[in-house]
Amino acid sequence: MTKKGIKKKIIITGSVLLMPLFLIFFLMIMFTQRSGTGSNPIVMAKGLDIPAGFLSIANKAATENGIEFAFFLTLSAGAANFNPDNFTNEIIPEVLGKAKTCNPDSLPDSLKEIYSIYSKYYNDLKVGPIPKSKIITTTVQKKQNNDDSKQPADGTEAGSENDQPQYETTSTEIQYTYSHSDDFGAQRTFGGDRAHEGNDIIADGGVPIVSITDGVIRDMNWNDFGGNIVGVLTDKDTYFYYAHMRGFNTAFHEGDRVKAGDVLGYVGNTGYGPPGTSGMFITHLHLQIGIKLEGQKKRFYISPYNIVAYLDQFRITLHEEANVGGGD
């Protein structure tokens, strides 16, 4: 290889290695200038955030026009100049126009990096973490009547239809509610001063928690911070962390593949101590979403608040069947 070729290779290799640094630098400049705060991952994550209301608008427009959700959001972020106040219906025509004349490969470098982030999680979001309700269908076998007085008057034996067990079915629906606020970046002190890198979803103890994406259960164990936790890894290597569970869905184990809507466990208040610790705080689900940036060892955590709010419209109803014995 000539010196010129070696030099070219070094430049290309260096550009690839520096890409994550460029992204971080780009985000720091863009997002911290507007906020006036110091450069840190929390500010960067908030700068990447898109309001829940616009996520719903964008999803509808992208779906109707056959456009990839993450790509549509990338163009929207560019049109809005990453300003939350600019994510409105007014930019939709501009975004649709651009989406029809370009593709992810033709984006400016800065937006390519934004697309590489958004495509790690937005395309995989399917359902809300707290179900809307659960319908329990109960089937009960009726008691058989063996009263001889009910035999046919002519003395013949009762028909075979009277020998068949009879059943009755009832259904009960349990409604689930929750509340949450934008607590991403709030101060936490357990284990030392730190920023909250997730969203706390307040719900009653025992309420089912479902996976919001497809993926593989990488972790189902105890964590001194999160108590009983489940970590689901998507095909894009994005980590969805569900913490403080009362208990797990015993039908699943580490290494199992789950689909969006599968029950992972149940809302609790475990954690902040050794195995078995509970009651240190109110019952809630802590949801955390970590993505991998190329060349970075630690995950970069995005704010889940608007994602949870957006997914509220996609909450599911669970179904459970119960059979109760009857007879004599």
Image (tube, helix red, strand yellow):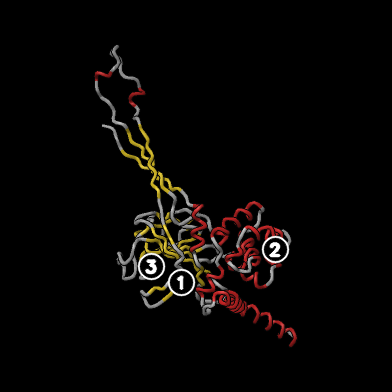
Identity, as a three-letter code, of the amino acid under mark 2: Asn
Which of the two labelled residues, at mark 3 and mark 2, occupies the earlier sequence position? 2
Q: Mark 1, mark 2: which one is toward the viewer?
A: 1
Q: Mark 3, mark 1: which one is toward the viewer?
A: 1
1 on left or right of 117: right
**Which residue does the image show at 34% across and 62% down from the upper left?**
282
Residue 92, quarter of the rendered image: bottom right
- Looking at the image, do the residues carrying marks 3 and 2 touch, with CB atoms under 8 Å apart? no
Distance, label 3 to label 2, CA atoms, is 40 Å
In the displayed structure, would residue 19 be above or below residue 101? below
Give the residue at mark 1: 185
For the question of whether residue 12 can be seen, the reply is yes
Farthest-out residue, left: 148
Q: Which element carries disc 2, helix, strand or loop? A: loop
In the displayed structure, would residue 283 be above or below residue 144? below
Give the residue at mark 3: 226
Identity, as a three-letter code, of the amino acid under mark 1: Gly
